[in-house]
Amino acid sequence: MAQITIKQVKSIIDRPERQKLTMKALGLGKLNKSVTVEETPQIKGMVQKVQHLVEVKK
């Protein structure tokens, strides 16, 4: 499968708990942190839920 790089560009302070947990599940939590993960339907769904907080590169 393809790999994508997800970078956190906005803070999770004052965000709903569900979004905080999604960010933690993606391996993010601090500004400008990046993770490279497999592009699966589950990851795509998580990214879509927090798309306003992250930046995605293929």
Image (spheres, rainbow, N blue to C red):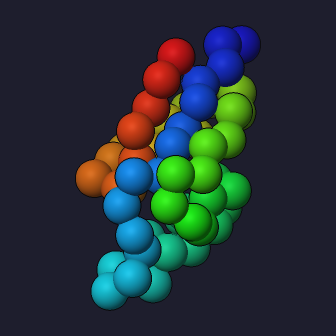
- Nearest the eye: 45 or 10: 10
In the rendered image, residue 35, in percent from the top left (x then y), is placed at: 67, 41
Residue 19: image location, x then y, percent: 43, 70
Residue occupying image coordinates x 39% and y 82%: 13
- Say if 49 sits above or below 5 in the image: below
Residue 37 vs 57, above or below: the answer is: below
Identity of the residue drawn at 70% across and 33% down: 37
Q: State whether residue 17 is above or below residue 34.
A: below
- Left or right? Give the position of 13 relative to 57: left
- Residue at the far front: name it: 32
Q: Is residue 49 visible?
A: no
Residue 50, horizontal then vertical, whole percent: 38, 55
The image quadrant that residue 56 belongs to is top left
Task: Residue at 57%, 66% (x, y): give it.
Answer: 30
**Quarter of image, res 15:** bottom left
Front residue of 31/54: it is 31
**Number of numbered callouts drawn:** 0
The front one of 8 and 23 is 8
4 with respect to 12 (left or right):
right
